[in-house]
Image (cartoon, rainbow, N blue to C red):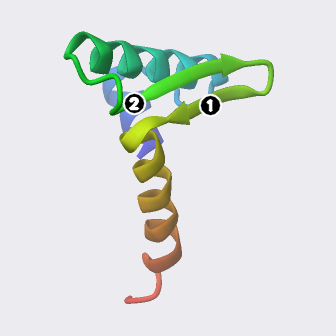
Amino acid sequence: MSDFIKDKLGIDLSQPSTKKGLALVGAGAALAMGHPDLLTASVTDTGVQYGGIIGTTVPVLLGLWETLRNEFK
C-alpha cells in the first residue's frame, strides 16, 4: 500500500516527518470541522502520539487486519 501511495501521489510514508505531517493535518481538519474529539495528535521527541476516537480505532483495526489477513487464505 505504501508503494502505491508513493508511486501515485509521491508521498513517502516511510519518513517520520511525513507521518507527523499527516497526523497534524488530520487533527487540524477534525478541529476545523468542529469535531476535535475525533482525532488529536501531539508531536513529541519520541514521535507522534495519537488520541481521540479515530486515533484509537485505526491502530486497533490495523492490528486486527495484520493478525487475521493471512488466516483465511
Neighbor class of circle 1 (other Cα within 10 Å; few <14, some 14-19, many 20+) is few
Residue 61's mark? none
Name the residue furthest left. Answer: 33
Name which residue lies at 50% across and 35% down.
51
Residue 39's mark? 2
Which residue was labeled with disc 1? 49
Seen in the picture, residue 10 relative to 69 is either above or below; the reply is above
Neighbor class of circle 2 (other Cα within 10 Å; few <14, some 14-19, many 20+) is many
Amino acid type, callout 1: Gln
Q: Secondary structure at mark 1?
A: strand
Amino acid type, callout 2: Leu
Q: Secondary structure at mark 2?
A: loop
Seen in the picture, residue 58 relative to 35 is either above or below; the reply is below
Name the residue furthest bottom. Answer: 72
Q: Specify whether 5 is left or right of 24.
A: left
Seen in the picture, residue 27 relative to 70 is either above or below; the reply is above
Name which residue lies at 25% across and 10% down.
32
Seen in the picture, residue 65 relative to 45 is either above or below; the reply is below
Q: How many marks?
A: 2
Q: Position of residue 8 (x, y in %)?
A: 31, 28
